[in-house]
Amino acid sequence: MSSGTHSKESVGFLSSLRQSHRRSNMAERKVKSKTDNEDEVPSRIASDPMAVTWLEKHNKTLEKYWNKLPNFLGSFIASVAVFILGSSIRGEWIYILVHFLKAFRYGDEEANSTSTETSNSSASTGFSLADYRLQGLGFYWIWATTVSYVLYLGIGGFLHWYYYVRQRDRSEEWKCQPNKFMPPELERHEILLGSFSLLLGSTVSAMLACYVMNGGYSTIYYDVSKYGWLWYFASWPVVYIWQDYLTYWHHRIYHIPFLYKNFHKLHHKYKQPTAFSVTAIHPFEFLHMQVVQFSPMFIIPVHWSVFCTLLMYLYYHGIIDHSGINFKAQWWQPWQPDCIFHDNHHQYFHVNFGFNCELWDKIHGTYRQKNKVYREDIFYGKGKSLEECSKDELKADLNERESENHLAYRGRVRDEQVLEVKKKLK
């Protein structure tokens, strides 16, 4: 597809939010004559602070103030909220801040060598954090975890309200699977699990930030002239491809039966993922993923601005891809799949293993095909041919296909997928 066609068909993130906000205000004016009891959304678990459903109790109040905002301002706030949450959800903000400070000469190793935080050492064992360039780790860890939890619960809660509460009755306009929602128990489960994984992620980020600030080894550099402008521009696609291709294989390996059943299956409890699902991963797998994402800083010479920008991009789209919302890639992102790509992965399990580039799935034959059936018990990403399926299997797959939102696709893709199964059932 040409970039022009891609641009014409693409429904950008910001424009989607504006349209959504405008439709919401129109709907509000239509129903403002209703009584207070009719407007109020009943709370399912109103007293549970670890389930975002408590927002439903306050929906009427939030809606009252939100609708006073101009359309463009409401859309802008939602856009910024998604970006902030996506780029900082695992504590990376402190790691990025450290590189920013070092780039502008505020983080010299010599200045840190006089740090007084070496009180973390133990006289009895002779162990000292300074020996590992981790002096002052407690300071970094407290800030990393505190800010991350505030953003995770605060902004994550806001985004949940903005879509899953405020626009729940119009889910066919924005949701990838408009008629399917996670039950309150699973919402609570993903937040609890995600909160624990967030603690691990913030700890890793705090350690790396502290290590870098204290002059620890890495291949990250701050002066472009060290490797020249040619490598600076070439490093953008090199590092991006490195991270994304490794992520593809990391993810695909965790779909091998043993690893899936013992680790990754925990993440696939959420067939209708939300933004909170992105950190709701088995702790072991979560740390493994962190190693993959941070690997370039120890292997490839990379300028701090390149590495930090790509890191924010990867995590931002992690939020988008797990949101369950039919966001489309922008015209300038021909490599980036739409949100439905990863939503399909959660709905059909062993398919579409890539994250920010669908090319890997197309090369390795794990891209979802309309003439294949995919289920949790069909491993290795190849699916099962419609010709080999029983009538009951075809009916079950048809039900899944029909539950998808055609607006989440470009053109008639969803309709063609449904028609393919219907032809086999005749």
Image (spheres, grey):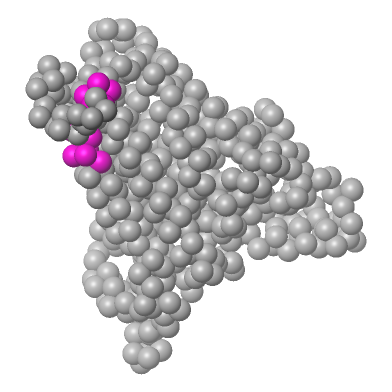
Q: Is residue 410 above or below residue 20?
A: above
Can you see residue 283?
yes
Q: Is residue 72 magenta?
A: no
Q: Nearer the viewer, residue 216 or 119?
A: 119
Q: Quadrant of the C terminus?
A: bottom right
Residue 68, x across and y down, in percent: 23, 71
Magenta residues? 127-141
Q: Quadrant of residue 114?
A: top left
Give the dominant element type of the magenta stretch: helix, strand or loop. Answer: helix
Q: Is residue 26 above or below residue 261?
A: below
Residue drawn at (43%, 59%) of the image: 191
Q: Quadrant of residue 406?
A: bottom right
Residue drawn at (30%, 53%) of the image: 149
Residue 267, x across and y down, in percent: 55, 51
Circle count: 0
Q: Is residue 97 above or below residue 239?
A: below
Q: Nearer the viewer, residue 287 or 377?
A: 287
Q: With 363 as the anchor, is 227 left or right in this view? A: left
Q: Quadrant of the N terminus?
A: top right
Can you see residue 97?
no
Residue drawn at (57%, 52%) of the image: 266
Q: Is residue 277 above or below residue 114?
A: below
Q: With 245 as the anchor, is 211 left or right in this view? A: left
Residue 236, x across and y down, in percent: 40, 21
Q: Nearer the viewer, residue 406 or 90?
A: 90
Residue drawn at (25%, 64%) of the image: 70
Q: With 91 as the anchor, is 238 left or right in this view? A: right
Q: Nearer the viewer, residue 254 or 416?
A: 254
Residue 162, x across and y down, in percent: 37, 64
